[in-house]
Amino acid sequence: MTSGFVSQSEQDRQNQRSVLGTFLFLVSLGVAFAGMFILYGALRSSMPAWPPPGLPRPPRLLPTVNTIVVVMSSATYHQALVALRRGRRSRFRLLLLVTTNLGVLFLLLQALLARQAISMGIIVGDTLYAGLLFGLAAFHAIHLLVGVVALGVLSAMARGGRFGARSSVELRLWGYYWHFVGACWLVMYVLLFMV
């Protein structure tokens, strides 16, 4: 097609391929997270005490607050898409921006959590315990940062009027990613801070 026009059926096929590609990417990312969780569980169960003697349990307050933040961000993202489908574009833009800011807040709280853990004596490189704690947190934070950048780009696109009442495939696919990364945090929260 030399005119740059893409037929609706070709667009639908492209969208289906994008959904499949995203699904496969999330499955592979899920396998990576699962591998890290299994490693954590195996090492933890092989130790006579967890945390090891002389080391404190990781703090719970900041991870609990971050859990609330990540759940709220998933809810605001979902509500943003609902607002867009209903033609409420200004509400959509606002909720998308709120979601982005909640993602930034999550990252800032993670940095505070790392600082607090270090001040408690949980220092990367000192013990396997600290390495696992910081390794899992960093792996998750990197993926959350990708999501925050994407949300920032989507927010800028929304301000430019890019999205109409029919939500675009980009919004849906980044929503899958965002909810997935949030779900990974919930598993981490239980494994690292509650059990």
Image (tube, rainbow, N blue to C red):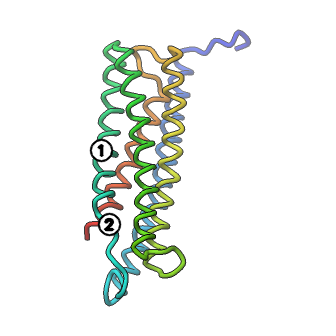
Query: Picture quarter containing residue 175?
Result: top left
Q: 85 or 109: which is nearer to us? A: 109
**Point 32% across, 55% down: residue:** 186
Work out which quarter of the rendered image holds the N terminus and state it.
Answer: top right
Residue 95: % across, % down: 36, 27
Q: How many residues crowd mark 2 within 10 Å: few (<14), some (14–19), many (20+)?
A: some
Residue 161: % across, % down: 50, 14
Name which of mark 1 and mark 2 comes first in the sequence. 2
Residue indicated by mark 1: 71
Badge 2 amino acid = Pro
Residue 13: % across, % down: 53, 27
- Vertical placement of residue 168 versus 99, above or below: above
**For this view, does 3 lie left or right of residue 9?**
right
* Disc assigned to residue 59: 2
**Point 46% across, 36% down: residue:** 174
Can you name the residue that lies furthest to the right here? 2
**Point 34% across, 39% down: residue:** 73
Can you name the residue that lies furthest to the bottom here? 48
